[in-house]
Image (cartoon, rainbow, N blue to C red):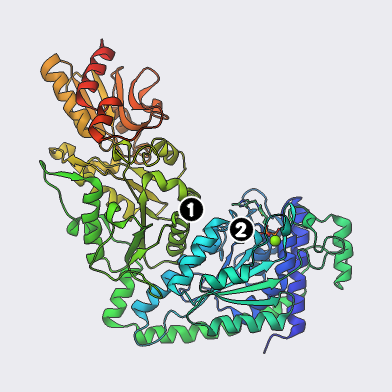
Amino acid sequence: MAISENDLVAVAKTVRTLSMDAVQEANSGHPGMPMGCADIAAVLWTRIMKYNPQNPNWINRDRFVLSAGHGSMLLYSMLHLSGYDLSLDDIKNFRQFGSKTPGHPEYGHTQGVETTTGPLGQGFANGVGMAFASKFLAGEFNQKADIIDHYIYAIVGDGCMMEGITSEAASLAGHLELGNLIYIYDSNRITIEGDTDIAFSEDVKRRFEAYNWHVLEIDGHNFDEIEEAVFQGQNEKVKPTLIIAKTKIAKGSAGYEGSEDSHGAPLGEDDIKKSKELMGCDGNEKFHVDSRVYEIFAEVLETNLKDYSLWQERFDSSVQGDLKLKWDSFFSAPSEETLREFLPTFKSGEKNATRGSSGKVIEALYKFLPNFIGGSADLGPSNKTQVSSVETTGKGRVGRSIHYGVREHAMGAIQNGMVVYGGCLTFSATFLVFMDYMRPAIRMAALSGLPSVYVFTHDSLFVGEDGPTHQPVEHLAGARAIPNLNVIRPCDGEETREAWISALTRKEGPTMLVLSRQGLPELGRNDSSSAQNLHRGAYVVVNYQEPHGVIFASGSEVSLAIEASKRLNDEFGKKLRVVSFPSWELFEVQPESYRKEILGKESKKIVVEAGLSMGWDRYAGNDALFVTMEGFGCSAPQADLEREFGFNVDFLVTKSLEYLG
Ligand SMILES: Cc1ncc(C[n+]2csc(CCOP(=O)(O)OP(=O)(O)O)c2C)c(N)n1
Ligand SMILES: [Mg+2]
């Protein structure tokens, strides 16, 4: 049975009353947005979207992204009504400790939440990543039938529209012609401080048309217009669609409709009672869902289940044999052993920049893993991420080697969208110094537990002549401060391969690979100093029975430490162990006995790292010698910087002797 206009009214009313009640009960939250978008949501979830709450991870479901994440009660209402694992009690516990209904939607926490949103604009860009991944998989698997042919829907607000990340992501989506995107802009012309006139006067329609989007304008409270616009969006196969929906924030509230006061605070018992009565509901009833509304969603489910089984049949009859094997490989992670079989090895005596070794690893990954995709924000040749063996992206074309353009922030968030979508292993790349341009997206990956891989090259002062604008100083400390982000700074090619293995086999969160621009010697290794020790975070590369002290170093400073240690022993009889310390995070999860053994009993500890010393005292104590950076670098050739900033063997030997006494 078709969903009638009265049904839509009933659903929208329920979203409004549940949202008012939940925010009131929590005494915090955002009722305005869900009330304003209730009509849009009612149409999307009953007449438009294909989804299956009984198999929430169905790969060909339509995705719904609530980019305006503060309106979480909109999403929770829809998830509850449509039969996801979210009860009315969960809604009553909105924003409470341990509930399934946190303030902003959290991926992995609440079934049916496709991506974590709240920081405005992230969701917009996540959706672009989903659309990219969807097109990529469609290209690989729609051989005999359309296996992947769904849409990505999002509701984005004025705030999303103002954020820079949205401009980056929209520009790329228009260029790639991601016609599977259908975004609805909740244009209520209200943000926290008031009317958007105070800060936002551009013509969004013309702006998005210029980005090569298909733009429509509708009344966001008119069901027919909403539905018709979405159909037009579906029929537009080339351009992404933006539906500018004129709405009223807090639509249906007796006293707050159209007012910024409804944005982020409960409406109050009085207004809620009056509003409910105006809507024809019992003013005293709380968290009420009319039985007809559940019936409507039972009908929706029936339709959706039919679509789902048709899809299943399509899948079973067309994805067979080699194509099925390929499908399975796309959806299973490669093991450490498999990766080690085909990844390159590096020989002692060679000299390689770790970005170069990483480049060789990337070439092999592209060759052996058909779902390995990624790219750089226009630094491919420098990041050594660009390969000629696979198709690149271009105007109207997705590909495995992605030209993100100079758009770091969107790159990070688009990558997150690909990861939550599934089916692909993906990396992004830029200079380490520009990680700050994508930091919010990295934080979201860490928070959401997404195994995104970041290739950050040109990792220190030793970038040289480009000067302090391009020389990272505080970036390692800043990265280590992000919970659940693994930071790995390998010292040579062998460690670089292992770092990639660590990143690609990690399931719990993102990993960043911090790589050198300059050449570094491959360490001479034996069994006990095998690069596979990288997975322990820190390990001994130079050992002595009764050492005078220990040097902790990472990345490009490991070979320097080894050379200094050798001279200190040969010329001065001072024995310093050297620990290659590529990753704090990997080290932290080792057994205590291992950590104690590596940190050692020596009271004399030296840290050598071309970055801030901040945080190293946790391993080396306050009395350690820190051969680190304490301020910005400067523009000069590498050798001069090594001398001036104290990162050469002579300096390290002299300083160590002074320190050891
Ligand atoms: C990056 C970011 N900056 C600031 C905020 C705080 N914030 C939350 S909602 C909001 C205003 C958003 O306005 P709009 O998108 O129009 O939502 P509406 O008030 O219409 O619901 C702001 C500034 C945020 N969540 N994310
Ligand atoms: Mg607004």
The residue to which callout 1 is attached is 441
Q: CB under 8 Å between callouts 2 and 1?
A: no
Q: Secondary structure at mark 2?
A: helix
Query: Label 2 amino acid?
Result: Met
Quarter of the rendering containing residue 105: bottom right
The residue to which callout 2 is attached is 162
The residue lying at 34 percent from left, 82 percent from top is 319
Give the side of residue 254 with respect to residue 51, left or right.
right
| Picture quadrant of ligand 1 | bottom right
Within 8 Å: ligand 1 and the Cβ of disc 1?
A: no
Query: Label 1 amino acid?
Result: Ala
- Structural crowding at the residue carrying mark 2, measured as other residues with C-alpha within 10 Å and reported as few (<14), some (14–19) or many (≥20): some
In terms of depth relative to the viewer, which is nearer, 399 or 636? 636
Give the side of residue 302 with respect to residue 378, left or right.
right
| Residue 552 position in % (x across, y down) | 29, 29
Give the side of residue 479 with respect to residue 104, left or right.
left
Q: Give the answer, above or below, for where 659 lies relative to 362.
A: above
Asked whether residue 480 appears in the rendered view, the answer is yes
The residue lying at 43 percent from left, 70 percent from top is 132
Within 8 Å: ligand 1 and the Cβ of disc 2?
A: yes
